[in-house]
Amino acid sequence: MPTAVPNSPVTEGWLDWHPDPSSPVFTLPPGTVDTHCHVFGPQAVFPFAPERKYTPCDAGKEQLFELRDHLGIARNVIVQATCHGADNSALVDALQASDGRARGVATVRPDVGERELLDLHEAGVRGVRFNFVRRLVDASPADALSTIAEKIAPLGWHIVLYFESVDLPDLEDFFGSLPTPLVVDHMGRPDVTRPVDGPEFSRFLRFVAANDVWVKVTCPERLSVTGPAALNGERHPYADVVPFARRVVEEFPDRVLWGTDWPHPNLTDHMPDDGLLVDQVPQIAVTTEQRRRLLVDNPMRLYWPGETTTEVA
């Protein structure tokens, strides 16, 4: 375990995660998987990467698992946060403490060796994440991604992609050439001020249809322009995002995933109530069948193939 070091101050204006999320009115189906959440530190034990673009508050595995149980979630997929760079120690620690109830998405460098990949696989990692959002990275990671994709393909892993919709035309041919399944974060960050049936989002849907792509209908609080926010009991938050998420769920019922994005890094306007985010699920998946696929069947097939939800204690 790393040697304890003094904490760096959090980024100015940083918003901590919601201290007292409400209990959801909507009851999640048994076996629900949160496929997009993070752990930050604790910094004194798992220092943040020197090259990070932000310094968050601590948000460790204990707090994540407490939220999991409070919301009625059965399992988590923990995604390596950019503040930890390619040091997956905090992620692996959380996976090992989950008693099999978590899988991971790591960050690795092109020179990663087979032994490290096998160790990550044993810990529960099933994918790697690449960030193409320009404000969060110094350069396009395309060359590194090609090298890493060849190394992880034999393990059956997938690649998680974070990009903005405006950049898809320059990236889609490259993405489509990769030898693994792809998982797109946050619906490719659509501009929700534009029509859901307009050319930009239609292009994204065609990209998904033409490739082995799964889509996370996540982070409405990050995409919304007009809100309202998921606070103070609001029953219909982020109404401008709902049509986009609903469209993806309707068109790709077997390739959609859901998650909380806890602890919601880099938000500057407000910090959502995670209970109210759960309550938004019936607005984007309007039938029982859609909800079961989104929340249980699809993530189990991707992250726990061959297992059933009844195997969770």
Image (cartoon, rainbow, N blue to C red):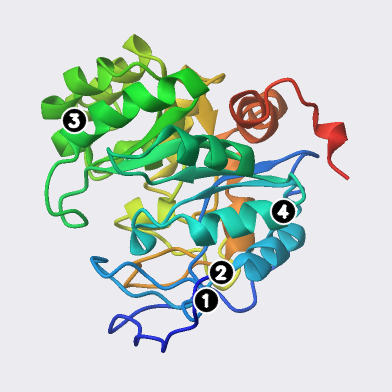
Q: Which residue is mark 2?
A: 1
First of labels 2, 1 by sequence position = 2
Residue 225 visible = yes
Question: Of the residues shown, which amino acid type is indicated by label 4?
Answer: Ser
Question: Of the residues shown, which amino acid type is indicated by label 1?
Answer: Val
The mark closer to the camera, 4 or 2, is 2
Name the residue at 25% across, 23% down.
175
The mark closer to the camera, 4 or 3, is 4
Circles 2 and 1: CB distance less than 8 Å? yes
The mark closer to the camera, 1 or 4, is 1
The answer to which image quadrant residue 296 occupies is top right
First of labels 4, 2 by sequence position = 2
Q: Which residue is mark 4?
A: 98
Looking at the picture, does residue 97 appear above or below residue 160? below
Circles 3 and 1: CB distance less than 8 Å? no
Extreme residue toward the top, this view: 210
First of labels 4, 3 by sequence position = 4
Looking at the picture, does residue 11 appear above or below residue 30? below
Question: Of the residues shown, which amino acid type is indicated by label 2?
Answer: Met
Circles 4 and 3: CB distance less than 8 Å? no
x then y, percent, for residue 75: 70, 45
First of labels 1, 4 by sequence position = 1
First of labels 3, 2 by sequence position = 2
Question: Of the residues shown, which amino acid type is indicated by label 3?
Answer: Leu
Crowding at label 1, few (<14), some or many (≥20) Cα neighbours within 10 Å?
A: some
Spatial CA span between label 4 and label 3: 35 Å
Circles 3 and 2: CB distance less than 8 Å? no
Q: Which residue is mark 1?
A: 45
Name the residue at 41% across, 57% down.
87
Screen quadrant of the N terminus: bottom right
Q: Which mark is residue 168?
A: 3
